[in-house]
Image: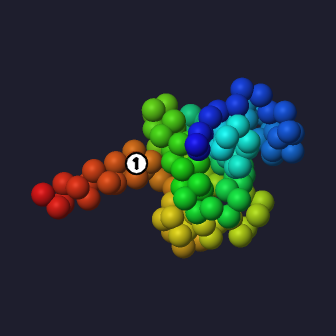
């Protein structure tokens, strides 16, 4: 069974800790039967959440779940923007397919509206 859980240490993610600099690095992992099958690394700021890297093993739905989990936590903290600072430019393709990003943008703005997008669609159908 798939579980998405935040880690409370950064063991094994030292390179990403360097990328985060002075920001507090957070790691959320995707687990299947206790084994790690993916992760997302990020930090919270006052105005935006910064994503430093993610690994979805090529699974677009896992990418969606990892990013949305961080989006939700950001919205709950009152953060409205997400910036993707990824070293691997190929990872932006998945984010564009999932409509987290448009064109060459590296920022997803207005997270609150994005997370409530399905509700907006539902209201239009009524």
Q: Is residue 42 visible?
A: no
Coordinates of residue 9 in the picture (x, y in percent)? 77, 28
The crowding category of the residue bearing disc 1, from other C-alpha atoms within 10 Å (few below 14, some 14 to 19, many at least 20), is some
Disc 1 marks which residue?
Answer: 115
Colour scheme employed for the rendering of this structure: rainbow
Q: Nearer the viewer, residue 82 or 37?
A: 37
Left or right position of 10 against 41: right
What residue appears at the point 59 percent right and 54 percent down from the top-left corner?
Answer: 62
Which quadrant of the view contains residue 3? Answer: top right
What residue appears at the point 84 percent right and 33 percent down from the top-left corner?
Answer: 11
Left or right position of 92 against 19: left
Q: Residue furthest bottom?
A: 103
Q: Nearer the viewer, residue 10 or 61?
A: 61
The image shows residue 123, relative to residue 16, as above or below, that is below
Coordinates of residue 108 in the picture (x, y in percent)? 51, 56
Q: Residue furthest left?
A: 126
What residue appears at the point 12 percent right and 57 percent down from the top-left corner?
Answer: 126
Q: Is residue 122 visible?
A: yes
Tally the marks: 1
Left or right position of 37 against 115: right
Coordinates of residue 52 in the picture (x, y in percent)? 72, 49
Left or right position of 115 against 97: left
Which image quarter holds the N terminus? top right
The image shows residue 13, relative to residue 62, as above or below, that is above
SS type, badge 1: helix
The image shows residue 10, relative to residue 65, as above or below, that is above
What residue appears at the point 32 percent right and 54 percent down from the top-left corner?
Answer: 118
Coordinates of residue 115 in the picture (x, y in percent)? 40, 48
Q: Residue furthest top?
A: 8
């Amino acid at each position: 069974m798939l579980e998405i859980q935040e880690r409370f240490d950064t063991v094994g993610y030292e390179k990403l800790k360097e990328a985060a600099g002075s920001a507090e690095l957070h790691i959320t992992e995707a687990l299947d039967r206790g084994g790690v099958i993916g992760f997302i690394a990020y930090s919270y700021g006052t105005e935006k959440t910064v994503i430093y890297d993610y690994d979805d093993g090529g699974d677009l739905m896992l990418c969606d779940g990892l990013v949305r989990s961080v989006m939700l936590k950001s919205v709950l903290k009152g953060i409205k923007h997400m910036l993707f600072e990824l070293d691997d430019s190929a990872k932006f393709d998945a984010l564009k397919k999932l409509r987290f990003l448009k064109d060459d943008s590296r920022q997803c703005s207005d997270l609150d509206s994005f997370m409530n997008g399905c509700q907006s669609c539902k209201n239009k159908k009524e």
